[in-house]
Amino acid sequence: MYKRHLEEKINTLNKRYRCITLVGPRQSGKTTLCRKLFPNYQYFSFESPDILDIFDSDPRGFLNGITQNAIFDEVQKVPKLLSYLQEILDDKKDKRKFILTGSNNLKLSYNVSQTLAGRTSILQLLPLQRGEIPSRHQQKTLEDSIFFGGYPRIYDEKLDPTDWLGDYFQTYIERDIRDSVNIIDLKRFNQFIRLLGGRVGQLMSFSSLGSDAGVTQPTAKSWFSALESTYICFSLEPHFRNFNKRITKAPKIYFYDTGLLCYLLRIKNSEQLNVHPLKGSIFENWVIAEYMKFFFNKGKEAPLYFWRDQHGHEVDMVIDQGTHLDLIEIKSGQTFQKDFVKNIEWLNKLQNRRGGKCIYGGSKKYAVQDINIEPWDRLSFET
C-alpha cells in the first residue's frame, strides 16, 4: 500500500468538512486510499448490484440504517443519493461524516456542484506520481517509467503493463464510456482513441480527427468529452497572455497515464520508445502529467498551459503565477543543447523576467544563465 501525497490534504479537510468527494480514473487507488485513511467507516460500493438494489428500493431507509461514518464508492451511479445527503449534511444534529468516490468527473462534478455546493470538498486522485512509488519499486530508466505508467496495480502485483492495460482499456470502454455517450460502433471508437494517441502533444483539430476516424466533428467532440470525463485524457489550453502577439487558440491533447498511451500506440516494450517517432511528445506528456498530479495532490487546480504564437515561438508548459508565467521546456534528449532554452529566453524578454526550467532526458542538474536544467528523475516542482 502506497503513501499518497493527497493524504495530507484529505486529513486536513476532514477536520473542516463532514463530506469529502474524491474523483479520478478507475484503478487510480481511490478506494484503497479511503479505506486506509478511514478504516472505521462503513463501506458501501454502488458497483455492487445488491447495494444498488437496496438503495433504489428505499433510499431514506438505507441511509437511516447507517449509524456511523461511511464511504460511498462510485456514487455517479446513484445521482439521487446526493439530494438525500444534502438533507443529512444540513442537519446540525446529525454528526455523521461521508466520503464519496467516483470515476466519472463530468457527471459527478455537475451533480455535486448542483446539490452539495458548500457542503463537500472535491479532490482528484490520479495514478501514482513517480515520487509516490517507493524507490525500490521505481523504474530506473526514463523509458521504463513512461512505459509502465502509474496505475498502482501494475506495481503491486508486478504485472505486465501491456496485458493489464489492455484489459483495463476494454473494461473501461464497456463500463464508463457507454455510461457517458451512446457508442454503437466500438471498433470505430477504438480507432478514434488510437488516432488520438497518435496526436499527443499536437494542436487539436476535431474536424481532422473526426475525418480520419470516419465520424463527424460533433461526434469527435462528444467522444473526446467522454474521455476527459473518465480521466483518460485532457486538453492543455494555450495561455491567453499575448504580449501583443497573435497566439494560437487550439488546445493540445495529452493522456493522464503514459502507460495507457503506450498501449494505445501499440508500443510493446520500453526499448521501442528509444526509436519511436513520438518519443519526444510522449516524454512531454509524462512531465506534464507529473505536474498535473503535483497540483491535484495539493488539492489545487493545475494552472498549466502552453504558449505559442503564430510565428512558431513556443514554450511547452507555462505555470500561471498570477503576476507572471513560469516557463518550462521539455526535451527527451539526454544531452543538453543550448537551443533547448531559446524560447524560454525569447518569452522571458517579452515578460521582462529571468529564470525558467528545462526538463530533459539526461542525468546532470545545473543552470544556464538563470535557467535550471533538470533531469527527468529529479523533478522539483518548485516555482
Image (tube, grey):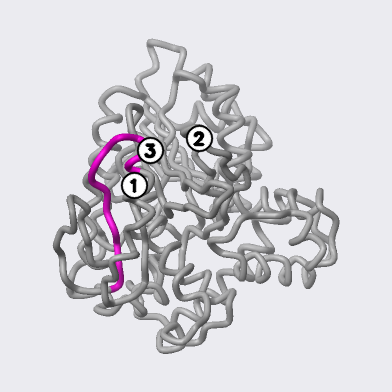
Task: Name the secondary structure under disc 1.
Answer: strand
User: Is 355 included in the stretch rendered in magenta?
Assistant: yes
Residue 369, disc: none
| Residue type indicated by callout 3 | Leu
**Can you give x and y, in whole percent of width and height, for residue 187 in the image?**
78, 72
Per the image, the residue denoted by label 3 is: 350
Residue contact at pointers 1 and 3, CB within 8 angstroms: no
Q: Quadrant of residue 12?
A: top left
Query: Where is mark 1, residue-wise?
Result: 327
Vertical placement of 242 versus 212: above or below?
Answer: above
Secondary structure beneath dot 3 equals helix
Which comes sooner in the sequence, label 3 or label 2? 2
Residue drawn at the location 82% of the way across and 63% of the way down? 211
Report how far apart the C-alphas of labels 1 and 2 lie in the structure: 15 Å
Q: Residue sitting at 14 percent across and 62 percent down?
A: 366
Identify which amino acid the numbered label 1 is placed on. Answer: Leu
Q: Is residue 39 visible?
A: no
**Of 128 and 63, which appears nearest the observer?**
128
> Magenta segment, which residues?
348-361
Q: CA distance from mark 1 to mark 3?
A: 12 Å
Q: Which residue is mark 2?
A: 242
Point out the frontmost of discs 1 and 3: 3
Residue drawn at x 46%, y 63% is 257
Q: Residues within 10 Å of mark 2 (few under 14, many from 20)?
A: few
